Each structure stands twice: as structure tokens, then as C-alpha cells.
Amino acid sequence: MTTVPARHDHRIVVITDHGSDEGSSAVLEAAVKQLTGAAALPLDARRFMTGGADRAEVRDGRLALHLAEDGRTLTPDAVIVYEIPPGDRHRFEDFQRVLGRSDTARLGAADSAAWRNATDKSRTVERFARHGVPHAPTITLDAPDREAALDAFSRLGGDVWTRPATGLGGDGVFHATTTAQLLAARDHYAATGRKWQLSRDARNFDARGRRHQLRVVVLGERVLRVCEHVQEALDEPCNEARGARSTVLPPEELPQRLADLAVAATRALGLSFGGVDLAVADGGCVFEVNVHPVISGPGALEGVALPLVQAHLTGPSAP
Ligand SMILES: Nc1ncnc2c1ncn2[C@@H]1O[C@H](COP(=O)(O)OP(=O)(O)O)[C@@H](O)[C@H]1O
Ligand SMILES: [Mg+2]
């Protein structure tokens, strides 16, 4: 016989996409257990997305979650939202609106505008430009004809990286230095129906000539974690999923100017937490800020998950 745990065992819910296997949710759940002594209740974010079976409402100022499967209603003390794939975030906005009307602790999880700033890279570069965050000169295109694509290519100097305006893990990211490569990239985005960007090559090489960048995870003004990413394949993006090697660095070794840059990039998008991809040369160049950087690897529980969960428990709930 299964017993339904008492509600006080589930003061904290961890809402992630259960179709994702990246593993951040397990680390967050371990952090909740360590900090509170009680298990978090994992819930599938897809069930709260537009068209999903579960429902959220505000009751007496608190978020109330109605679970269709067993008819339960939960009123958690804190909601941790993570591992929501970029392409699905727009379907999570109704839930965020409800969450935002409640006074339930959630750090920045209700701030759909900030999420959009980070998820749609055309918004990202606009915000970076407005807030003086250094980034590669970028042009965004939506279903351009050949001439428009080639014109953008030559305006950026004929050595560019192309990326989908909403993407993940270096998927659909290409280095183009010839018109044939640029037109092949254009075909790729046309086939997938995606808005895309060209940005001038950041020349992010290390002393040995390899592609090099940092992933800096920021919480408010604090740098929680720094990983160095090195890519031997010079035309491949510096993503682990594309063969880059990742090494954890002590956060205190990050030069202050790069810590300040990572914090400024996160703040420019309105995020209270994020994983910043940046190149270090020439004062720094920010590629993007990830709303939910993968939490994995040595020290990730202590370095990222514990302070992030702690901030949910002690920080202000807004927005
Ligand atoms: N202008 C550029 N110069 C050099 N490398 C780039 C440039 N734009 C993108 N890249 C590489 O492609 C990677 C993927 O782009 P990014 O914006 O981080 O998207 P995602 O990681 O979501 O796919 C970057 O982290 C970087 O390694
Ligand atoms: Mg990235």
C-alpha cells in the first residue's frame, strides 16, 4: 500500500520538465533535502504548461497547485522552477502569471519578461546594447532572402557565427567564413523555420590557439561557479554538448572585471540568477545568459544548488 505523505513533507516543490534528462532537478532536490531535512516534491512542468492537466491558482495569497492525477491540492512555501527548455518557455507563461500574483517564494521564477530577454537572443542583444554589456556585433534575421543574408554577412566582415535566436547547447550554431557556408546556414534555419542571428567572430582563442570561454553562474551580485570551456575544433561552438572540455575554476580566481561583467549581463536581462557564457579577450564579450544553466559536475551541489535553494528560502519572493 502506498501512503500519501503529509503536506508538511512537501513545503517545497521542484518544478522541472520531466522529459529532460540533464539532471539538474536531482541536484536541486538533494539541496532541498540537505537544507530543510525534508524531501522536495518533484512536479512535471509540462503539466502546468498551456494545455497541461494540472492547474494553478492563488488562494489567500498563496499559490495553490491542483494535481489532476490524485486530486490533491498543494500550497507550497516555496517553488523552485528549473530545467524548462527554451522552446517551451512561452507555454509556461500563464503559470508564471499566476505564480507572480501569489506571495509564495520563488526567486525570479515568475518573471517571464526576464526569461524572454534571455531566451530570445534578439532581445538579449538589444538589452546588452542598451546596458553597455560588451557583445559581438550582431544582426538578427527572420526568413531572409539570399541577398539580405549575404548583405548581413558582408556588413559583419565575412567571418561570423550563426545561431538560432532561441537555442540550446550549441545546436544549430555554425561558423561561416564563406558565402557557401553562410547560405548553407540560411538553408538550415529556413528548413527549421527559425529566426536566426549572425555575429562577428569574437576571436576567443587561448594562448594555444584553441577556442576558449567561461561559463559564470551568477546569483544576484555573487559569482557562484566558474567553468572554463576549451574547444579544439575551431569551427565548433564551445559547448560541452559539442565536444568542448569543461574545467571548474575556483570562483575567487575570476578577475573582478569578468565577475562584474557576468553580474551586469545577468542584471541587464532582469534575471536574479543565470549562467553567463563569455569570452575573456579584449574586456570580455558575452554570448548569452542561460536562465537555467545545467547544474552538474564536481562541486555543483555545494557551489550552485545549495545557495540557489537557500536564496529561494530566505530571499524576497518578488518578482
Ligand atoms: N560571435 C561568436 N564568436 C565566437 N563564438 C561564438 C560566437 N557566437 C556564438 N559562438 C559560440 O557558439 C556558442 C553557442 O552560442 P550561445 O549563444 O551560447 O547559444 P547556446 O549555448 O544556447 O546554443 C557560444 O557559447 C560560443 O562558443
Ligand atoms: Mg551557450
Image (cartoon, grey):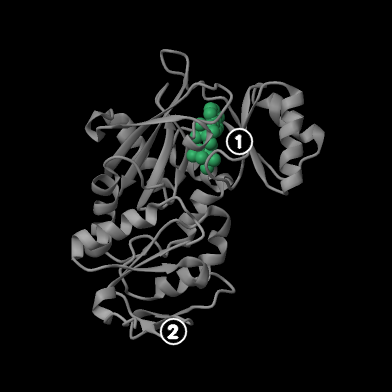
> Crowding near pointer 2: few (<14 within 10 Å), some, many (20+)?
few
Q: Image point 25% across, 45% down: which residue?
A: 303
* Image location (x, y in percent) of residue 235: 59, 24
Query: In the depicted view, which residue is nearer to us: 284 or 7?
Result: 7
Disc 1 CB within 8 Å of nearest ligand 1 atom: yes
Mark closer to the observer (2, 1): 2
> Please, is residue 304 above or below residue 91 in the view?
above
Q: Image point 36% across, 47% down: which residue?
A: 295
Query: In the depicted view, which residue is nearer to us: 205 or 133?
Result: 205
* Residue for badge 1: 173
Q: Image point 63% across, 22% down: which residue?
A: 159
Q: Image point 33% across, 41% down: which residue?
A: 297
> Please, is residue 205 above or below residue 228 in the view?
above
Indicate left or right for 296 with 201 as reference. Answer: left
Disc 2 CB within 8 Å of nearest ligand 1 atom: no
Disc 1 residue type (three-letter): Val
Q: Decide if residue 74 is in sight here.
A: yes
Local secondary structure at mark 2? loop
* Residue for badge 2: 70
Q: Decide if residue 221 is in sight here.
A: no
Local secondary structure at mark 1? loop
* Image location (x, y in percent) of residue 182: 72, 29
> Please, is residue 72 above or below residue 170 in the view?
below
Query: In the depicted view, which residue is nearer to us: 164 or 319?
Result: 164
> Please, is residue 6 above or below residue 231 in the view?
below
Image quadrant holding the C terminus, namely: bottom left
